[in-house]
Image (tube, rainbow, N blue to C red):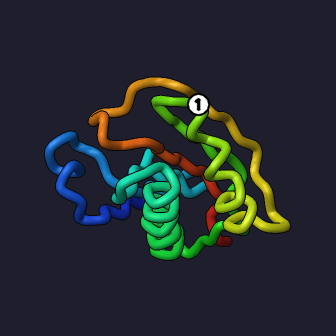
Amino acid sequence: MRITRIPSGGEFEQKVGYVRTVVAGGFVHVAGTVGQGDGVVEQCHSALSIIRTALEKAGASFADVVRVTYILPDRHEFEPCWPILRETFGDNPPVTTMIECGLIDPKYRIEIEVTALAPD
């Protein structure tokens, strides 16, 4: 099985020892991604932008996403993100899980991880 690792150049990839994206087994796996901004909505937009770039580097798009995991330190902040997520996935909604737990830094309000079908 061929494995392709696609780093994003983010500072934590070297510190922690991971890459943003791995293509393997017919899937594109994008690591949990946090965004920048003052609140959950801004961070959600930002994280999705980073994920979009990661998917594109692997030859995929949000239409190819089959699973999403949302991780938030406060589940009550998830609902304001719903319109963004509906717009992002449109007619191609993936299966999804939302987990409430602490993130690596309290300034982060949402982390998003996706799995997509890899291009043929």
Which of the 4 quarters of the picture holds residue 103? top left
Residue visible at 63% across and 34% down? Answer: 98
Can you name the residue that lies furthest to the left here?
A: 15
Which of the 4 quarters of the picture holds residue 5? bottom left
Q: Can residue 60 be seen in this view?
A: yes
Compared across the picture, whether 113 is left or right of 92 comes to left
Which of the 4 quarters of the picture holds residue 92? bottom right
Q: Is residue 2 visible?
A: no
Tag 1: amino acid = Arg
The front one of 82 and 14 is: 82
Residue visible at 39% across and 56% down? Answer: 35
Q: Can you give x and y, in whole percent of width and height, for residue 107 in the image? A: 30, 42
Residue visible at 23% across and 51% down? Answer: 13
The front one of 68 and 82 is: 82
Check disc 1 and report its element: helix, strand or loop.
helix
Residue visible at 60% across and 71% down? Answer: 60
Q: Name the residue under label 1.
A: 75
The front one of 72 and 27 is: 72
